Amino acid sequence: MKTTSDINDNDYDAGWPENLPGYTIENPIVDLLYVEIDYSNNILGNLWLERQSYAVVQGPSGIGKSMFGFQAAVEASLGKPVFGLAVAKPLKVLLLQAEDSLNDRIRQAACIKRLAPSRAEARLAGLNFRIFTPHKRASRGEELFEFLGEAFKDFNFDLLILNPAFAFIDGNVNDSTAVGDFLRSQLQEFLRVKDAAAIVIHHVPKPPKSGKGRDSNTTMYSGHGSAEWANAPRGSMTINRTRVPWVFQFDIGKRGSFSGWTPDREGYYIRYFTHTRQGDMFWAEASEEDIGAAETGFSTDDFDSVFSSDSDYTFDDIKRRFRHFGYNYSDQDLGDILAEAVERGKLVKTKKAEGEQVWHPIKAAKTSPRDVKREAEYEARVEIVYLAISEAGPAGINVNGLRLKGFAFGSSTLDECLKRLAAAGRIEKRPDGRWVVVVRALDDPAVKN
């Protein structure tokens, strides 16, 4: 074997075949190491989707995948970012669909008014985008791609969108052989011939539980059927419901670092979009308030309305008040939402003397996450002191007695807690120096709330 000092340029090809039918042969040093990336092959993102490759976009039924496909086609045809994925130039897009009626497509087309407001832009979309819908059952598998190859033998397009995969695969979606043939052989070969890319829209078995679906490491495997739906595509994106019905989480589970999206603090590639349910159908970038509602389960205004006083709220109180504002959560979902609110420093959870769990809102507005955390800690200590005074009953308890409770905080914090409780009218100091809980009358508005 030759050492590095013995190798010269004439030795590079010694013994290796110069060509192999159906294969590209490359020397990693000569052919790849110093070659610039070819961005002319880019279709979406920062090489997230290239020519001759495909991605799967998946989500549960009724979540707006068809609208995603239509709007993505319009945006790509205009050369505008597709759901935050960059597009270098206007693309020619073919949407092949077998799911939406004529009226569905008319409603979907309304998004063009927002995406292409000028006459010139509308004409560009009309030039670059076509929808094909079969009159009867769609051709499937090998027959489908033979048909497309013949139909488009003299026309080149850049992006093919198939909606849904169920309509076009020839075989069982749970069969890895059938799925592999459809994706790796039939679709892949067609894209190579056309030098185009594709998005395949696919279903997940059932909607993920609100806010508790698969994490970002595994969403790519949530598609219905064989794991080939996750393994074969070059890229993948999953659309999930959130805790509120108008905001949706888009999660790039595969090749997220090539998407151009900014990763979150944990390194996941997640963005939020809202989907209109009234008026013109349209996916829009979520606002900060929308994102907050998606993560917590309620809008800021509704939260303030539910917790409109400084009272303690039982679980049943909160459930009833949320329902008044249109949030019909199950007990488990509401429990998750309240736990999140406690973690975010919006609520404090404690127990009354009789053992009943209650929640108390933190009202003070803060300017930083550190301030929010500090205030949440203070409110938790306030509730600990309040519980200690409640347990003392009508006899009350003085400051020295409270200090003997062994609180995990000092005298100055205890004094501040007593001050806050007294200011809120929850405790009072008797002439003998003992603190007692204020018993409110049944007609007190704070009790009614």
Image: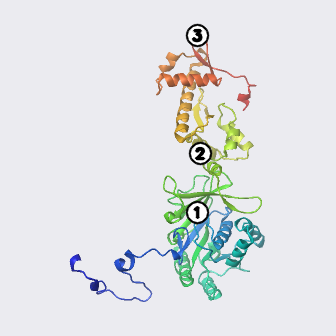
Q: Is residue 147 visible?
A: yes
Q: Which mark is residue 336?
A: 2
What residue would you read off at disc 3?
A: 432
Residue farthest toward the top in the current orientation of the protein: 432
Q: Quadrant of residue 13?
A: bottom left
Report the residue marked by disc 1.
238
How far across and down, in percent of the image, does residue 447 sit? Answer: 71, 28
Viewer-side residue, 207 vs 53:
53
Q: Which mark is residue 148?
A: none
Q: Are marks 2 and 1 in contact (CB under 8 Å)?
A: no
Front residue of 207 and 29:
29
- Quadrant of the drawing holding the C terminus: top right
Closer to the camera, 53 or 124?
124
Q: Secondary structure at mark 2?
A: helix
Give the image location of residue 290, x and y in percent: 65, 51
Marks 2/1: CA–CA distance: 22 Å
**Is 50 on the left-hand or right-hand side of 166?**
left
Q: What's the CA distance linking mark 3 and mark 1?
A: 65 Å
- Which residue does the image show at 41% across and 76% down from the upper left? 35
Dot 3 or dot 1, earlier in sequence:
1
- Secondary structure of the residue carrying numbered label 3: loop
Tag 2: amino acid: Asp
Instruction: Please report the residue visible at 73 percent of the width from the left and 44 percent of the height from the top.
Output: 325
| Amino acid on which disc 1 is placed | Thr
First reached walking from the N terminus: tag 2 or tag 3: 2
Q: Quick check: 18 left or right of 133?
A: left
Q: Amino acid at mark 3?
A: Asp
